[in-house]
Image (cartoon, helix red, strand yellow):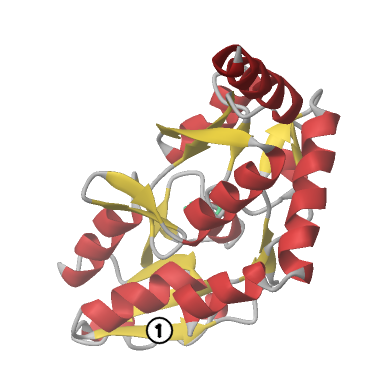
Amino acid sequence: MKKLFLFFMTFISIVAFGKNEKLYVGTNPEFYPFEYLEDGKIVGFDADLIEAIGQKLGKEIVWKNIAFDGLLPALQSKKIDVIIAGMTATEERKKFVNFSEPYFTSSQVIILNSENKESLDIKSYENLPNHSVGVVLGYTGDVAVSKVPNVNIQRFNGASEAIMALKAKKVQAVILDSEPAKNYVKNNKGLELISTDIAKEEYSIAVSKDNTQLAEEINKAYKELVDDGSYQELINKYFK
Ligand code: GLN
């Protein structure tokens, strides 16, 4: 009888708290320190944040590793429920998905190779014309540089590839989000970072347009994590 009671209580708690519910989360783990692979596992600031949100919602996170430009299509076709990928909440993307409250402010910066003479006259976006500039396909850096006339844009599939081309002097600058950029500069001798005055960007979690309830739940859970200090702990863990 006791066993039956226990079984019944477990069943009730699973139903009541949705413990076995899954949240399919898409990301592209090439964006240190937000998401990257460690022993084949997706880790990083975004990973910790969505795990904490998942816990609040009583949902188990199931990761899907997807190319960055495949994330929005995957969300729209319901292969995933959520994107967390250092994704900037742009007006263009807002036409297709719902974004949560922003959780991180970033900007686009210029990375130079100080050993390449042809890089050295680049001091700001205004100096990009008549240079070959590496960006990652579909990133906001791509969108920003595409608006500057007379730039020879080279599009790469990932930030590491763009950085390799910069080191090999195949491009004279790379435009990338500030935090991953800082990390490449730290780990690659000769690379130099120039902060730009280009507008700040905000990273948000994306859910599909018709899933307004999930967006609200995520916002509520996020607010709780900010209020109880967990968000600040994550900032300290990854950025201090
Ligand atoms: N913030 C940039 C964007 O949204 C880059 C994101 C990323 O590479 N993960 O396009």
Viewer can see residue 153: no
Eyeballing the image, is 93 above or below 222?
A: above
Residue linked to disc 1: 193
Which image quarter: residue 88? bottom right
Viewer can see residue 38: yes
Return the residue nearer the eye: 54 or 141. Answer: 54
* Residue at 55% from the left image edge and 55% from the top image edge: 86
Residue 14 point in image, percent of width and height:
65, 24
- Please identify the residue farthest to the left as the structure is shown: 168
* Residue at 62% from the left image edge and 34% from the top image edge: 59
Is residue 224 found left or right of 72 in the rendered image?
Answer: right
Crowd around label 1: few <14 · some 14–19 · many ≥20 (10 Å): many
Eyeballing the image, is 107 above or below 84?
A: below
Return the residue nearer the eye: 121 or 178. Answer: 178
Q: Quadrant of the N terminus?
A: top right
Residue 223 point in image, percent of width and height:
80, 60
Callout 1 secondary element: strand
Residue 194 point in image, percent of width and height:
46, 85
